[in-house]
Amino acid sequence: HYWLAYSGGMDSTALLSMLAMHRHRVQAELVALHVNHQLSVNAEKWEEHCRDFCKTINIRYESVTINVRDGRKDSPEAWARELRYAALEKFMQQDDVLLTAHHRDDLAETVIQQLLRGSGPEGLSAMPETRRFGPGWLARPLLAYGRSQIEDYIKDQRLTWVEDESNSKQGIDRNFIRNTVMPTLKERWPSATDVLWRVSRVQADAAAILNDVAGQD
């Protein structure tokens, strides 16, 4: 199976649409998998939207509900992400692939986050295109593309998506980086996103070399 982590947002909607159009090119079944975090008053409406869209494009749809309210108060976003991936992994079978819609702008934001945490090569490598995940793999097929390209695709295909109201909350570190830091960097250095992508690849190579040498030692 190809399990697509489908939130109903713009990015995962674009990826699901692309994959649905090219489903004849893959031999494994494509399934849209939605995680309901129960954090928004609109959570049920989002799930209904996702179910209806999958029905429209004739893609199998699955959903799972998780409870993140009783988690870590110091980092609720990290706790929600941890629970989300744990829930997604339960669907995985041998050699299945989980697909996420992370793109180049997401990667650039992660590099900045990791830099401010004082991370080394492993952390600064941010998001690999593929890695082992449970009994199968996790893949990010949109890392070669930026947010603006995905927005163009969505407009061209006239697709609708859900907008998570928490994306505008500046108290969340990633939102502050996305809405304030990155626009300021791009105004001064227009190629900032691509540069940060190159930084992540260099650090990924460095981390791989360090691991190889450590293994030999």
Image (cartoon, rainbow, N blue to C red):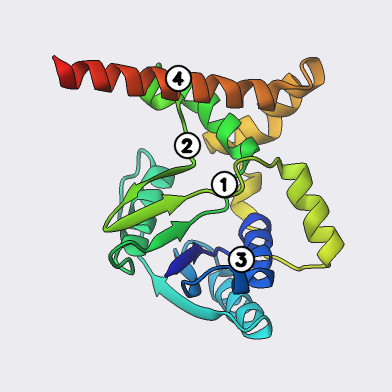
**Three-letter code, disc 3:** Gly
> Total number of numbered labels?
4
Comes first in the chain, label 1 or label 3: 3
Which mark, by number, is residue 102?
1
Q: Is there any visible trace of residue 171 in the rendered image?
A: no
- Residue occupying image coordinates x 79% and y 15%: 188
Q: Mark 2 points at which residue?
A: 127
The alpha-carbon separation of the residues under discs 4 and 1 comes to 19 Å
Q: Which of marks 4 and 2 is nearer the N terminus?
A: 2
Say left or right for 210 vs 110. Answer: left
Examine the rendering and report whether any part of residue 16 can be seen.
yes
**Which residue type carries mark 4?**
Gln
Q: Disc 4 versus disc 2: distance between alpha carbons?
A: 11 Å
How far across and down, in percent of the image, does residue 13 sit? 65, 63
Q: Name the residue under label 3.
A: 8
What residue sits 44% from the left and 75% below the top? 63
Find residue 64 and report its image quarter.
Answer: bottom left
